[in-house]
Image: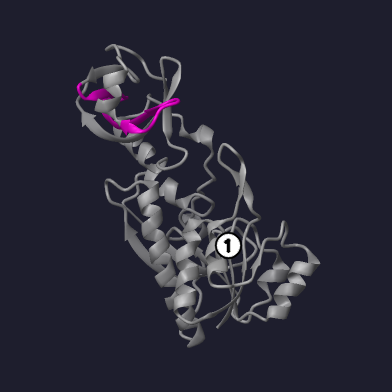
């Protein structure tokens, strides 16, 4: 098939790689403009751009898809399909109607659940046991097009947003190829989503990582896992930010929310007679480390309240 690929972050890479390895003609890649990153604000290319250039695929980085020049350029390439994977821009109606087989989106949830920008994080935060990937025919609504294929992925108790991201990305690449093969052989028809079963997964920002100790340890453990690797769950310890990367749940603990009740191991009280052991932490200005190593250089008094 003659394909235009639209994607930006690391999640998109397995899908682009799968297209290349399965001998589809990726005529062009559209991705977000380079952005400054790091302390020195060095201009950095999106991961998808780097992979495309490795295979000499033409790369386009328009600021807007509503530009007539961009739309005409897409029409000239006469794609059979436009594949969209975490692109970060909404496709206008004029583009959706260009490809012969339509625009196919690879979404990291079992639609109609978790429409939106952060389905991976919210599935963990909300305590889901399973999630998956859905391929869908795009329309003008946000993740509201007809569903094509689904692949289920288990969420393990120790999964973080980072590990689940990698599982779903790999699954997405395989599901995309299966979807395209079935479309090409006229073996696939869309299934409408039931809006009553939908839920939204809004984009997560740095401020969303702040821990509310007035929740039980089970909820907070899911929250910590869902915020890892970014923006990382955080609290305040003696006025400094303390990031928490991993934790263990402890039940039947009579303690106040946010109170340090032990330093061997480092344990903090939560709601409903639960507590949480902090396993990996990072204090402001220092490196990430195991809590036992952290305590060697930071004395914490019992009864100290975090937050």
Which residue is depicted at the point 57% across and 36% down? 39
Number of labelled discs? Answer: 1
Asked if residue 279 lies in the magenta stretch, the reply is: yes
Q: Is residue 275 visible to the viewer in this orientation of the structure?
A: no
Q: Quadrant of residue 262?
A: top left
Asked if residue 79 lies in the magenta stretch, the reply is: no
Q: Quadrant of the C terminus?
A: top left
Q: Which residue is mark 1?
A: 49
Using the image as rendered, state which of residue 88 and residue 110 is in the foreground: 88
Using the image as rendered, state which of residue 264 and residue 254 is in the foreground: 264
User: For the residue labelled by badge 1, is the local secondary structure a helix, a strand or a loop?
Assistant: helix
Using the image as rendered, state which of residue 82 and residue 222 is in the foreground: 82
In screen coordinates, is 50 left or right of 158?
right
Which residue is depicted at the point 26% across and 27% down? 293
Which residue is depicted at the point 21% across and 29% down? 251
Using the image as rendered, state which of residue 30 and residue 202 is in the foreground: 30
Q: Is 173 drawn above or below residue 183 in the view shown?
A: above
Q: Position of residue 288 (x, y in %)?
A: 36, 33
Q: Is 181 drawn above or below residue 165 in the view shown?
A: below
Q: Position of residue 124 (x, y in %)?
A: 37, 46
Magenta-tinted stretch: 264-289
Badge 1 density bin: few <14, some 14–19, many ≥20, Cα 10 Å: many
Q: Is residue 92 visible to the viewer in this orientation of the structure?
A: yes
| Residue located farthest toward the bottom when viewing the structure as drawn | 185
Q: Position of residue 49 (x, y in %)?
A: 58, 62
Q: Position of residue 122 (x, y in %)?
A: 44, 46
């Amino acid at each position: 098939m003659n394909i235009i690929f639209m994607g930006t972050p690391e999640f998109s890479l397995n899908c682009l790689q799968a297209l290349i390895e399965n001998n589809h003609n990726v005529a062009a890649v559209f991705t977000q403009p380079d952005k400054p990153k790091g302390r020195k604000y060095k201009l950095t290319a999106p991961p998808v751009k780097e992979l495309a250039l490795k295979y000499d695929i033409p790369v386009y980085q328009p600021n807007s898809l509503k530009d007539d020049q961009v739309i005409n350029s897409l029409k000239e390439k006469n794609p059979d399909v436009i594949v969209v994977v975490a692109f970060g821009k909404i496709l206008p109606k004029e583009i959706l109607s260009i490809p012969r087989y339509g625009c196919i989106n690879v979404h990291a949830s079992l639609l109609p659940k978790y429409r939106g920008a952060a389905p991976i994080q919210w599935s963990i935060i909300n305590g889901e046991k399973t999630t998956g990937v859905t391929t869908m025919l795009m329309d003008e609504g946000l993740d509201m097009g007809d569903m094509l294929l689904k692949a289920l992925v288990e969420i393990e108790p120790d999964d973080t947003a980072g590990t689940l991201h990698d599982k779903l990305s790999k699954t997405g690449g395989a599901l995309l190829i299966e979807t395209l093969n079935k479309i090409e052989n006229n073996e696939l028809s869309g299934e409408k989503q039931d809006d009553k079963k939908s839920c939204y997964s809004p984009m997560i920002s740095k401020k969303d990582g702040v821990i509310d100790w007035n929740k039980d340890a089970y909820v907070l453990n899911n929250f910590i896992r869902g915020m890892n690797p970014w923006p990382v769950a955080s609290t305040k310890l003696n006025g400094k930010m303390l990031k928490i990367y991993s934790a263990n749940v402890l039940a039947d603990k009579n303690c106040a929310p946010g109170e340090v009740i032990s330093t061997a191991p480092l344990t903090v009280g939560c709601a409903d007679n639960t507590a949480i052991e902090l396993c990996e932490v990072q204090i402001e200005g220092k490196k990430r480390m195991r809590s036992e190593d952290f305590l060697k250089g930071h004395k914490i008094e019992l009864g100290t309240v975090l937050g």
